[in-house]
Amino acid sequence: MLQFVSTKGGGEPVDFETAILDGFAVDGGLYVPETLPGITQDQLKKWKGLNYTSLAFEILSLFIDRSIVSSEDLKQILHTAYEPFEKKEIIPLHSLKSRKDTYIMELFYGPTISFKDVGLAFLVNLVNFFLERKGEHLSVVVATTGDTGPATAYFVAGKSNIDAWVLYPKGLITEEQERQMTTLQQTNVHPVGVSNCPDGGDDLDIVISKLYANKRFKEKLKLSSVNSINWGRVMMQTVHYFYGYLQVTDTIGEHVSMSVPSGGFGNLCAGGLARKMGLPIKHLIVANNNNACLHRIFSKGLFTKKAIIETPSSAIDILVPYNFWRYLYFCVDKNPKKIKKWMHEFNTTGSVQFDKDTFERYSDGFLSNSSSDKETLDTIQDIYKTESYLLDPHGAVSLHAADALREVLGNEKLICLATAHPSKFPEVIKKALLTNALPKEATHQRIEDAKRLCEKVHLCDHSHLEEALMHAMEANWDETKGI
Ligand SMILES: Cc1ncc(COP(=O)(O)O)c(C=O)c1O
């Protein structure tokens, strides 16, 4: 049976269910499968023509032992997860008119209209399935730069075995994203708006790690994570790379490139692993904004933390791409000692300069770019004017990166991942289109509905977040358990 181990090498190997329910590994590392399953061209040929959920079933079955989740249960979980999606294709591909062989993968047709729905729909339903079977309850704490929070809140809402604490940096996400979390009115969803986060969403991750490190608290409240720390998110996100490939190719074996707007590297880690499994992806483009943390890693071999810059693509204003460690693990012969050493170096000095051999290994097959605010806004305007297609700022970062690297790319087909619906970013769209009147493509009924509901939220200053959060979480836990 496939076992899961920590990227830092601590603890014993665990089974799939434990890896999913724990979120973090015991030593603070990230869970990874002991071996990455390989796929052949024959398998890819068989999968051509499958719809999204049937393809997901095939890919997930490579990681999930039938004794842990039976095929009927896996099918049922997938069905429940993707039923609320707006389009029957789940993630349709849109062919651009102005660029040859270029497609936009629309990952925003889930209930909270960002690509986070794609991973969280499955993960939350899977966690719930395990908890119901065990008769247990757990608390998840997530930090968000605007999209993980709404998706977690939506899928957890009303599930009696899970409480979700959803932390967001107040003022650094859009009002629309905030209202998606605060208007749900479900007693098991607890949005927490945190003021004065100097490093944005990264500050919240630090507090969450401290809660995990507190053994008494972690055990009492059965803390877990559905951030892309959780292997389940990364695993589920491999599916859209396979799906996109199978949709745009005529012949199995031909190469495709993909451009991905990146922050924490969860999405790209999945893309990199899909390629390592055997998917013929030529280039993976790391599309960054001005924060450029991943661009520095992939162009200079330098992993360093700088001050945060606010940009129009706020969901990727991220300084520490923690899933990079997970991908790196697979590039250095799965050597946990190396990962541990580099993580320690980064945590103590704020910077790691990778040696030439390591750099060559992890950057193989990757290109990177950082788009300025103007380039992002111009891309939104250009594509709207030329073909009446409205991208959100993150999709624009992805398309701009591909345009900027066009000469390095070959003739292969290109898929740009669009990770959010433009209605989540109305002020950016107005700025890009130089208008105060939003076009209908920049509105969405779900966003309009949330405007008419009352908000329920905990507010807290970053300076005392840890203490205040522990107090609120413990009081809620005791109340729910009748202690
Ligand atoms: C809209 C959007 N695009 C891209 C990303 C980046 O994804 P990742 O953190 O997996 O790189 C995020 C989240 O962080 C997001 O919300």
Image (tube, grey):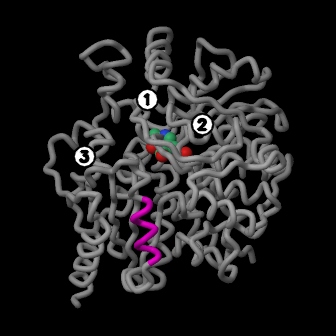
Along the line of sight, the residue nearer the viewer: 49 or 396? 396
Along the line of sight, the residue nearer the viewer: 308 or 365? 308
Q: Residues within 10 Å of mark 3 (few under 14, many from 20)?
A: many
Looking at the picture, how far across and down is residue 180, in whole percent? 28, 47
Looking at the picture, how far across and down is residue 286, in whole percent? 63, 36
Q: Residues within 10 Å of mark 2 (few under 14, many from 20)?
A: many
Q: Vertically, is 277 above or below 293?
A: below
Q: Which mark is on residue 440?
A: none
Marks counted in the figure total 3
State whether label 2 is within 8 Å of ligand 1. yes
Looking at the picture, how far across and down is residue 450, in whole percent? 22, 43
Identify the amino acid type marked 1: Asp
Q: Which mark is on residue 260?
A: 2
Identify the amino acid type marked 3: Arg
| Separation (CA) of disc 2 from disc 3 | 26 Å
Residue shown at 44% from the left, 71% from the top:
128
Q: Vertically, is 297 above or below 59?
A: above
Q: Which residues are magenta?
A: 205-213
Mark 1 lies on residue: 392
Mark 3 lies on residue: 179
Q: Secondary structure at mark 2?
A: strand
Along the line of sight, the residue nearer the viewer: 168 or 37? 168
Identify the amino acid type marked 2: Val
Residue shown at 55% from the left, 58% from the top:
233
State whether label 1 is within 8 Å of ligand 1. yes
Q: Quadrant of residue 457?
A: bottom left
Q: Residues within 10 Å of mark 1 (few under 14, many from 20)?
A: many
Q: Residue furthest bottom?
A: 483
| Separation (CA) of disc 3 from disc 1 | 18 Å
Looking at the picture, how far across and down is residue 12, in whole percent? 68, 83
Q: Secondary structure at mark 3?
A: helix
